[in-house]
Image (cartoon, rainbow, N blue to C red):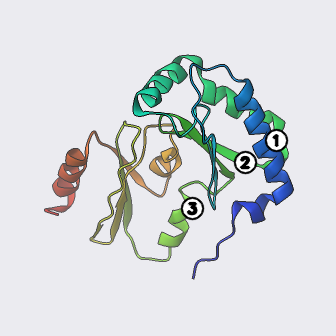
Amino acid sequence: MCLLKSIVEHFGEENLQKFINYCLIYIANVNIPVKRGTFIEFRNGMINISPIGRNCSYKERLEFHEYDKVHRIREAMITDLQHKFPEMDMQFSIGGQISFDCFPVGWDKTFCLRHLQKHDFRFIHFYGDKSEEVLVYSFFLNKTFYVSREEQGGNDHELFCSKKTIGHAVTSPEHTAALVEKQFGPL
């Protein structure tokens, strides 16, 4: 049985509201080419923050991603949040093209490894590409668990680099399948 604790229970409603209000004010004051709405997405175990807004078009998403590579909007916001809310002991992870995740320290994707430890897996292989889209593949072959990851520094980076996993960089789903078949035989 897995016991769940929400981010609200962890930080408390008052602290979360202070954090979210600050983020909304920060986004209102940041100067970027476009803003499109849904800037904060609340999830059970984390908060996803997007300075451009999740409602942006695909073209705007790509343009923001290029803009952010130069101007480091998300990086600057994370640095500001770390200084403003050190007592919250929050971890930040840039993933994808337009947003970053905020969650309690230790609640990153390596959390799933705790549940795998009770099984007799000899290895945990983690496959990931350099694109911004997460590709998830799960195979149970020879007591080995496989999943994919995002680009380095993304929200799956900790899982890719964990001492408990063997990370493999791939370029596509076909490349992933080829590596798996080469190491473990036909799928």
Mark 1 burial class by Cα count in 10 Å: few <14, some 14-19, many 20+? some
Please name the residue shown 39% across and 71% down the image: 121
Q: In the picture provided, is 2 more to the left or to the right than 77?
A: left
- Which quadrant holds residue 130? top left
The three-letter code of the residue at mark 2 reads: Met
Q: Position of residue 34 (x, y in %)?
A: 57, 24
Q: CA distance from mark 2 to mark 1?
A: 8 Å
The three-letter code of the residue at mark 1 reads: Phe
Number of numbered markers: 3
Q: In the picture provided, is 146 more to the left or to the right than 180?
A: right
Q: Position of residue 44 (x, y in %)?
A: 63, 62
Query: What is the number of the mark on residue 146?
Result: none
Q: Position of residue 176 (x, y in %)?
A: 25, 49
Q: Residue furthest top?
A: 70
Q: Which residue is identified by label 1?
A: 85
Q: Nearer the viewer, residue 53 or 5?
A: 53
- Going from the N terminus, do you reach mark 1 or mark 3 first? 1
Please name the residue shown 48% across and 27% down the image: 65
Q: In the picture provided, is 174 more to the left or to the right than 160?
A: left
Q: Secondary structure at mark 3?
A: helix
Mark 2–mark 1 contact, CB under 8 Å?
yes
The three-letter code of the residue at mark 3 reads: Phe
Query: What is the number of the mark on residue 90?
Result: 2
Q: Secondary structure at mark 1?
A: loop
Please name the residue shown 27% across and 71% down the image: 142
Q: Position of residue 78 (x, y in %)?
A: 68, 34
Q: CA distance from mark 1 to mark 3?
A: 23 Å
Q: Is residue 94 above or below residue 4?
A: above
Foreground label between 3 and 2: 2
Query: What is the number of the mark on residue 111?
Result: 3
Q: Which quarter of the rendering shows the N terminus?
A: bottom right
Foreground label between 1 and 3: 1
